[in-house]
Amino acid sequence: MKINQAALGGFLALVFAATSAYAAGPTDPQIASIVVTANQVDIDAGKLALTKAASPDVKKFAQLMITDHTGVNKAAVELVTKLHVTPESNPTSQSLQKGGDDNLAALKKLSGAAFDKAYVDHEVVYHQAVIDAVDTTLIPSAQNAELKALLVKVRPAFVAHLDHAKKLQGELSK
């Protein structure tokens, strides 16, 4: 468990450091890459949770993460295709991917209740970090009105995910 928390802490430090490294904020192509990567990381974790979670509630949450984040990615890809924007890899999207890979590696070593707790704990911290990045960096930096509107539109879903994960976290702690 401590390995997973250490990996998560390192991951979040990289995300915040990379995000703050943009003096003027990330460009729209960089934002597109960040959005797609952040969603894919959560989809991948959800897919693992479907196979490893012990709690039916955790499995339902994992399926919700897969469904919702796949939908956001679909909308993002459709928008950048329409706008002829090619997502541009950047330090933030790269650190998100590395953090996601590290999280999966840590979760794969766990099973049962330990897996459920680690997965849900990560989801709480991850969704809070994503919301913070959306609010402080992505929305303010988005230049294209449609991209900004998409970020504003999906933000409530991320908040709902955070609330759901916190509720699960409380139930698993009992």
Image: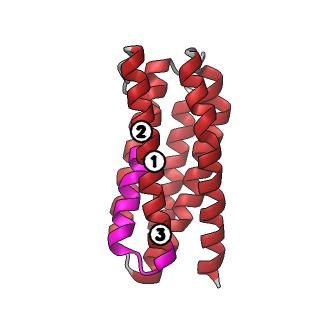
Number of residues whose C-alpha sits closer than 10 Å to that of mark 3, classed few (under 14), some (14–19) or many (20 or more): some
User: Does the residue at mark 3 contact the one at mark 2 (Cβ under 8 Å)?
Assistant: no
In the rendered view, tell whether residue 62 sits above or below residue 73.
Answer: below
What secondary structure is found at the residue carrying circle 2?
A: helix
Locate residue 25: give its quadrant: top right
Q: Can see residue 22? A: no
Magenta stretch: residue 174 in it? no
Q: Secondary structure at mark 3?
A: helix
Residue that numbered label 3 is attached to: 60
Say how many tags the image has.
Answer: 3
Mark 3 in CB contact with mark 1 (< 8 angstroms): no
| Marks 1/2: CA–CA distance | 6 Å
| Residue to which mark 2 is pinned | 73
Q: Which residues are magenta?
A: 39-57
Residue at image location 43% in from the left, 75% down from the top:
115
The image's colour scheme reads secondary structure
The residue that appears at 50% across and 60% down in the rendered structure is 6
Instruction: Give the answer, above or below, for where 130 lies relative to 6.
Output: above
**Cα distance in 3D space between marks 3 and 1:** 14 Å
Estimate the x, y position of residue 136 in percent, counting from the top left.
67, 32
Which amino acid type corresponds to the residue marked 1 in the rendered image?
His
Residue at position x 45%, y 47% from top?
69
User: Magenta residues: mostly which secondary structure?
Assistant: helix
Q: Which label's residue is closer to the chain start, 3 or 1? A: 3
Q: Is residue 131 left or right of residue 80?
A: right
- 66 horizontally vs 152: left or right: left
User: Tag 2 or tag 3, which sits nearer the N-term?
Assistant: 3
Q: Secondary structure at mark 1?
A: helix
